[in-house]
Image (cartoon, rainbow, N blue to C red):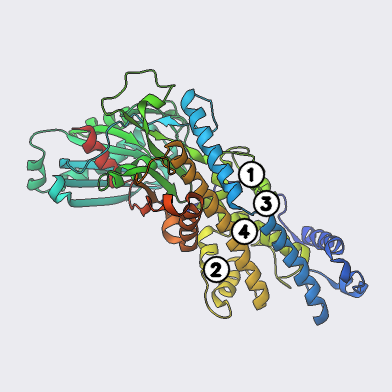
Amino acid sequence: MGFGEAAPRERESSSAHGPREAKRSCRGAMAALRLLLPPSTNNVSPFFLSTFSFGSLSIRPREIGIMAAVAEQVVADLREKCATPASLLRDVASAMAGEMSAGLEEEGGSKVKMLLSYVDKLPTGREEGLFYGLDLGGTNFRVLKVQLGGTKKRVVDCESREVTIPPHLMSGTSSELFGFIASELAEFVADEEEESTDLLNGKKRELGFTFSFPVRQTSVASGTLVKWTKAFSIDDAVGKDVVAELQTAMEKQGLDMHVAALINDAVGTLAGARYYDEDVVAGIIFGTGTNAAYVEKANAIPKWEENLPNSGDMVINMEWGNFFSCHLPVTEFDQELDKESLNPGEQIYEKLISGMYLGEIVRRVLLKMSLQSGIFGDNDHCKLNKQFHLRTPHISTMHHDETPDLKIVSEKLHEILGITDTSLETRKMVVEICDIVARRAARLAAAGVAGILLKLDRNGSVDNQRSVIAIDGGLFEHYTKFSECLESTLDELLGVEVSKSVTVKHANDGSGIGAALIAASQSR
């Protein structure tokens, strides 16, 4: 999963500026400036205020310091409201563990859904044979073939193919979409060499299906679609079993393939990492969105009324993006973003820590700073005023700028937002805003991880009990300062001794190879 890949279709911003709106905004900014000026600047000349405008900024050099002071106050306020001291993070971790327990007690008992994945057997590394994976989660899907050679050889070979879904199929019918996917699967299989066919020994091909849309799962290989997200809007698929739809489509293609498991990318990440390391206890996604899956003792799930599995374990799909606690440091920018989103009041934790939203939070801060201080000078606010125009990869690039004059920040402000001629001090403020927002996200993410360890009693209660957290997703992989801060914060929360037994690992491609490995483990 990437980070900040595709902006959701939000409501139009009520603050979009046309020529008249820009004038009104200018007058509002002047009024705000009067209110925000520190007491020491009360004697600023009326001439300064009367010439303050965004269309043609005209100020004298001595007034620049006043503008900088106002801008710095916006940054200082943000820093204070985004503060995440260790005591607060421990409260967040405790709240996460509490919500996990409540979600396991009964359906609807918590904002963290704690969904049963029905995966009770994870790969061990002993699996042998040929298995397949299908990863559907966006405008492309991938098919994979994985040859497993047991304990000694592990993954002998892995082949994959990525296919773009034609736009008309994303709003067509269920049979059209799954028919297209099945035809591509059939073509992928048809290209196999005779050697691959021999590995099957006359058995059906086993497929693991990663489906990254909300489903109500009823078994390890069945689940009804709750709703589409992203760019999909296939109405007749909602309420249907997506595995049955795919199975029917494959049979029409004459494809001798069986769907062994339906999973999401968090479960896939857990499975992919567990294949190589039996101490992996959780798989977490930090990308465009965020989610977590972990291994729970089956007898610790009161809402599960069926017979306990032989393994004694059950993988739980937390859907932790919907977590909320009064301890979360939510700012006015977060509140406005949530209010204008397609799902107000939901996924608050995700909106604070995931790649979809970090760039947008920074944009909102920059817009306020500019409107109140005029720090960006004579620049059009058209791009800065556009929702989701500043993306998380953009702020990552600026945040990692190590040039003496922050040249990359200057280039990005110009390229992305149309802002030119910024001073070095202004660029430093931009970097600090990126740092505040990303650091808050990383530290809150670490608190979530600590919450899982707390729920599993792996926070030091058992000496030398090794715990591995597998993490995938573009935010973690590509935003270095985010991942480094997450890991250092987790060490801070766990303490020196406990942190020695906890390892964070980057687990690549859980949504792909993880699906094939789950298929292998289910076929044992």
Residue pointed to by mark 3: 333
Q: Position of residue 3 (x, y in %)?
A: 47, 54
Mark 2 residue element: helix
Q: Choose the circle earlier in sequence order: 2 or 4.
A: 4
Q: Inspect the image, locate mark 2, and give the three-letter code of the amino acid beneath it.
A: Met
The answer to which quarter of the image holds residue 476 is bottom left
Check disc 2 and report the residue beneath it.
398
Picture quadrant where residue 254 is located = top left
* Residue occupying image coordinates x 16% and y 45%: 148
Compare marks 1 and 2 and give the one earlier in the sequence: 1
Question: Which of these two is toward me, 299 or 342?
Answer: 299
Relative to 66, does residue 462 appear above or below in the rendering? above
For the residues marked 4 and 3, what is the alpha-carbon distance in whole angstroms? 9 Å
Disc 4 from disc 1: Cα separation: 14 Å
Marks 1 and 3, how far apart in space? 9 Å
Q: Residue under circle 1? A: 338
The answer to which of marks 4 and 3 sits earlier in the sequence is 3
**Does residue 311 appear left or right of residue 499 in this picture?**
left
The answer to which of marks 2 and 3 sits earlier in the sequence is: 3
Sequence-wise first label, 1 or 3: 3
Q: Residue shown at 77%/63% (left/top)?
A: 372
- Please identify the quarter of the rendering in which residue 204 is found: top left
Does residue 21 appear to the left or right of 171 in the view shown?
A: right
Is label 4 in contact with label 3 (beta carbons under 8 Å)? no
Q: Secondary structure at mark 4?
A: helix
Q: Which residue is mark 4?
A: 362
The reply to whether residue 438 is in sight is: yes
Q: Residues within 10 Å of mark 2 (few under 14, many from 20)?
A: many
